[in-house]
Structures are given as C-alpha cells and as structure tokens.
C-alpha cells in the first residue's frame, strides 16, 4: 500500500475526504427519509414502508429511482437561475459544515480553529436558499413560505449562537476537536450537565433552524401547502428534501459534538480507540430520533408564538446563563 | 408554572408508547378479512335462468350492461322466447349500485364477493357471459333523438301533419286496454 501514501498528502486527502463526506451526507438524507417514515408509521400504529426489500429497507433506493425519472417542471414565469440554484444553495452549506465535525479521534476533514464560527456562518447561508426558492418560484405561497422561513431562521440564529457561547467559554477554543477533547473521561464531563439550559436552548433553536415540526411554518403543509418548495418537482425537490434531512442530521451531529461529548465514550472503559465513531453515531442517531419523535407528537406553533419563544424566552435565558457561567468560571 | 410543558410530555409519552405497541395495520394481500354478507362485489350472471327481459340493461345508470337478444326456443316448448345470446358487464363502468340486482325478475344477476378488479387494459374489465361476445364500448342505450326539436325549429308548417299522430295514439291505447279487459 506504499503507492497510496500520496492520498495522505494535503490536496488529495482533502478532496478524497470531502468526497466521502458528500457521499455520506447524501446517503444520510436518504436513510433519514426512510427513518422518518418508519418512525411516523410506528408512532401512528402503522408499519410504514415494508414492501421494497427486507422490511422495506430498500425503499430509499426506490424513491431515488422514482425521483430521478420524474420530469423536472418549473413555472413558466419563474426566475429560472434562482429557481434552479436554490436547492444547491440549500444543500452545499449543509454538506460543507460536515467537514468540521469530528467523527472519531483524528477523523475530521478540516480541523479549523474557528470551526464553531464556520458552523454558525455557513448554516446561515441556508436561509438564503429558502429565500431564493421562494422568490424564484414567483408564486404567492412560495413567497409567503420564504418570508416565514427567513424571519424564523434569522431570529433563531441568535439563541443558537448565544447558546454555543457557554461551551466556547468553558473550552476556551472555537475548534470542535478541542471541544470534544475537553469532554473526555466519562459522561459526567459532558457539557450537557453543566450547560443544561444551553443544551435545551440549542436543541430548540436547532429544531427551528432545520425547520422541523413544531417550527415548520415555512413549509406549513396545511396552510401554505408546502411553502417555498411548492413549485419544485423531481430531482430539485429531492435535493431540497435532502438538504433538509441532511441539515437535521447535521444539527444532531453538532448537538452531539458540543454537548454530548462527540465521539467520547460514556464510560472510560468503553473506549474503542479509532472505532469511537460508533459512539458518535449512536448519540447522533438518538438525537435524530428525538427530532422525529417530536415531529410526530407536537402541533405546529403560530408565527407570533414562534417569535415570542425565540426572543422573549430563549434569548434572555441564554444571556442569563452566560452570566452565570462566567460567574462560576470566575469563582471556581 | 407546574403545568408548563405537561401537555407536551403527555403527548410525547403517548407517542413513545405507541412506538412499541402492536400495530393495527392488516397487511392486505397476505391477510384478507371476511367480507360482510351483503357485500357488493363484482356482478355475475346465471345465464341459464336469464330470460333476456333487458330490465337490468335499462335500469343501469352507467350503461355497463349490454345484451344481445334474439328469439329462440331454448326450453323446447315449441315457442320462441327472448334469449340472450350475448351478455357483457363492463366493470370499468359499474358503480355497484345494485339496481340491476333489485330489478331482475328471476334473480339471475347478483353480486359475488370478488372485488379485486384490476387490469392492464380497460377492455379486460368487460366480462362476457353469453355465447357471443358483445362490444362493451357501444352504449346500449343510444341518446334520445333530438330530431323533433330540429323539425320544430325548421318551420311550423309541419305541425298540423304531426298533430294527427298524438290523436291516434290514445285511440290505440284505449283499444288495447279494452282488449285487456275482455281477456
């Protein structure tokens, strides 16, 4: 395997690992769609898809084949470049943020020293994709959905960023690798214990940021029939869906990394060395499951309730907890 | 304050319990439930009993039954009677209203418990019962002629000539009824 050593050199390593991450992100979206449908079925006393393959496990494959063969329709008066660019503008940021997430010790595509800043900056591009989709479709419902999406995503950025600051203060670093390393040695060292209110706020803002159900106003199936993605069909629609589900997976992954110790095992003797990505996977999958569980249990918030929750509850809570954290760091 | 979030927790606990409960879905092709006694499935005809009275064909609101009728001495009584040589039920049009079943004087048309009426072609759903196939695409009851209206529009000169006809008809009817009384 000597001749493969060049893959460890810088441009090749990055290109290869970026390809792997992109592949994993797309697959994650397909698998999450499947998981979503299964969880929805089981919660509603149904089986969910169970015909394609063993226990319906090949359903995502069938879905992808169906979506690839569907015609791609765009409205006649649509702003075509913006219309077609929106799904890409939604998907690329999500895939890009996966680059800074550490999967296992040493297994991170780009160990940025400003990874948290990168995460915050790049996820806000997702709002741009939503606005592009709504504006480019030139449809009233799309525009309504896009406006709601923009309002929601921009106002929930604030508690999202503020809730990160506690972790940043405790770690003293913006690098996700440092954050994970600081949480080693058992689950009592994970930040969700000392930063519990921040964990809850981050989780709720993450739900809002990924437009998941109690905060799915931009989509609003029952009021504005799909919001900004009304006019999409076929593969463009699939890419929007992939971006949403990959964004949900990303938010679960970031929550795990920041508050649940990333790839750190819950107890010190369960350390599998390089195979610690199993712990990262288990924790992320659990968070994803709670996302789905919430989605199929809770009703949607009203727009004013959404804004109230964001600005009047979450932001003050994070500010107060920041002061408490700073005081505690000063004392101890 | 103690009630804060209680509703959310209650709902979430219900959904979590549902996650592990037995599912109530019946997997259809593997599991088929017993149908009720009066199920209206696909129609079938007992051609031995059919007297070709054409009542089912006339009453059908969807025009899905077509019958080709001839006179034939089928029972050997030496007297030719109406006989259905062709009988087709087009299930692609049938709406299972059961009017034909109600109207049949000899109970020869009835519902079965079969309901899986799927086909690749619409014409496959037309089921033939008679000796001779009948084209199911032909409407057994052609629409009422609209010629009288045209004639009226053309001119009122013919009115008097046509006016004789209604007068004759009651006379005929009266004659028939008197015959019936005599018999």
Image (spheres, rainbow, N blue to C red):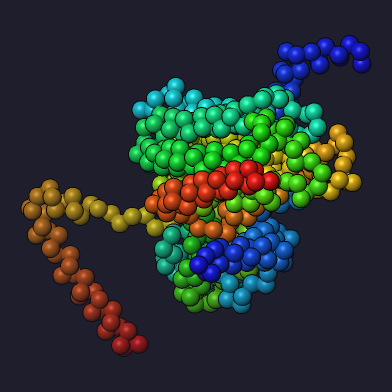
Q: Is residue B171 visible?
A: yes
The residue nearer to you, when weighing B73 against A204, is A204
How many dots with numbers?
A: 0
Q: Quadrant of residue A105?
A: top right
Judged left or right of residue A77, residue A61 is right
Please say if A214 is above or below A104: below
Image-based side of A297 in relation to B142, left or right: right
Q: Nearer the viewer, residue A247 or B69?
A: A247
Q: Nearer the viewer, residue B66 or A187?
A: A187
Residue B80 position (above or below residue B144): below
Horizontal arrangement in the rendering, residue A200 relative to residue A60 (left or right):
left
In the image, farthest residue toward the right: A1
Q: Position of residue A63 (x, y in %)?
A: 64, 39
Residue found farthest to the left: B157
Image position of B94 with respect to A69: above or below? below
Q: Residue at x 39, y 39 (%)?
A: A147
Q: Does any portion of residue B65 appear in the rendered image? A: no
Image-quadrant location for residue A174: top right
Q: Position of residue A126 (x, y in %)?
A: 52, 32
> Most extreme residue toward the bottom, as rendered?
B182
User: Looking at the image, which residue is at 56% across and 67% down?
Assistant: B6
Which corner quadrant holds the N terminus of chain A?
A: top right
Q: Position of residue A89 (x, y in %)?
A: 52, 27
Q: Residue at x 47, y 52 (%)?
A: A313
Q: Position of residue A280 (x, y in %)?
A: 76, 41
Name the residue at 18% across, 53% down.
Answer: B149
């Amino acid at each position: 395997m000597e001749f493969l050593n060049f893959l460890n050199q810088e441009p090749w390593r990055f290109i290869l690992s970026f390809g792997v991450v992109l592949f994993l992100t797309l697959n994650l979206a397909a698998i999450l769609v499947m998981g979503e449908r299964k969880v929805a079925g089981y919660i509603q006393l149904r089986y969910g898809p169970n015909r394609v393959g063993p226990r319906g496990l090949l359903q995502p494959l069938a879905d992808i084949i169906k979506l690839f063969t569907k015609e791609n329709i765009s409205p006649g008066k649509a702003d075509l470049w913006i219309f077609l660019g929106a799904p890409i503008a939604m998907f690329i940021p999500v895939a890009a943020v996966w680059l800074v997430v550490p999967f296992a010790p040493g297994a991170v595509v780009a160990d940025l020293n400003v990874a948290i800043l990168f995460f915050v900056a790049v996820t806000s591009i997702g709002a741009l994709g939503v606005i592009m989709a709504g504006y480019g479709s030139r449809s009233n419902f799309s525009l309504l959905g896009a406006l709601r999406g923009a309002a929601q995503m921009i106002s929930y950025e604030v508690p999202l960023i503020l809730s990160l600051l506690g972790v940043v203060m405790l770690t003293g670093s913006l690098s996700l690798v440092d954050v994970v390393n600081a949480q080693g040695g058992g689950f009592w060292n994970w930040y969700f214990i000392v930063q519990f209110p921040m964990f809850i706020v981050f989780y709720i803002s993450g739900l809002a940021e990924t437009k998941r159900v109690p905060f799915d106003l931009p989509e609003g199936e029952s009021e504005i029939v799909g919001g900004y993605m009304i006019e999409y069909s076929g593969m463009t629609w699939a890419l929007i869906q992939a971006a949403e589900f990959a964004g949900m997976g990303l938010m679960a992954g970031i929550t795990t990394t920041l508050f649940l110790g990333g790839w750190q095992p819950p107890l010190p003797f369960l350390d599998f060395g390089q195979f610690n990505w199993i712990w990262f996977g288990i924790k992320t999958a659990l968070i994803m499951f709670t996302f789905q569980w919430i989605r199929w249990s809770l009703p949607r918030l009203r727009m004013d309730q959404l804004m109230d929750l964001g600005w009047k509850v979450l932001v003050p809570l994070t500010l107060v907890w920041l002061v408490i954290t700073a005081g505690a760091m000063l004392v101890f | 304050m103690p009630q804060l979030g209680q509703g959310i927790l209650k709902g979430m606990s219900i959904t979590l319990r549902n996650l592990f409960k037995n599912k109530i879905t019946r997997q259809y092709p593997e599991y088929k439930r017993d149908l009720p006694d009066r199920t209206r499935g696909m129609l079938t005809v007992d051609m031995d009993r059919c007297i070709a009275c054409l009542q089912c064909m006339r009453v059908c609101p969807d025009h899905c039954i077509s019958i080709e009728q001839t006179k034939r001495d089928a029972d050997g009584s030496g007297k030719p009677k109406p006989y259905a040589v062709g009988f087709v039920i087009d299930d692609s049009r049938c709406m299972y209203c059961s009017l034909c079943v109600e109207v049949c004087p000899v109970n020869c048309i009835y519902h079965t418990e079969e309901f899986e009426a799927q086909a690749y072609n619409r014409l496959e759903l037309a089921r033939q019962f008679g000796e001779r196939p009948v084209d199911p695409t032909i409407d057994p009851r052609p629409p009422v002629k609209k010629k009288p209206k045209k004639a009226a529009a053309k001119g009122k000169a013919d009115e008097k000539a046509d006016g004789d006809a209604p007068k004759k008809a009651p006379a005929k009817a009266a004659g028939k009824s008197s015959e019936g009384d005599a018999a």
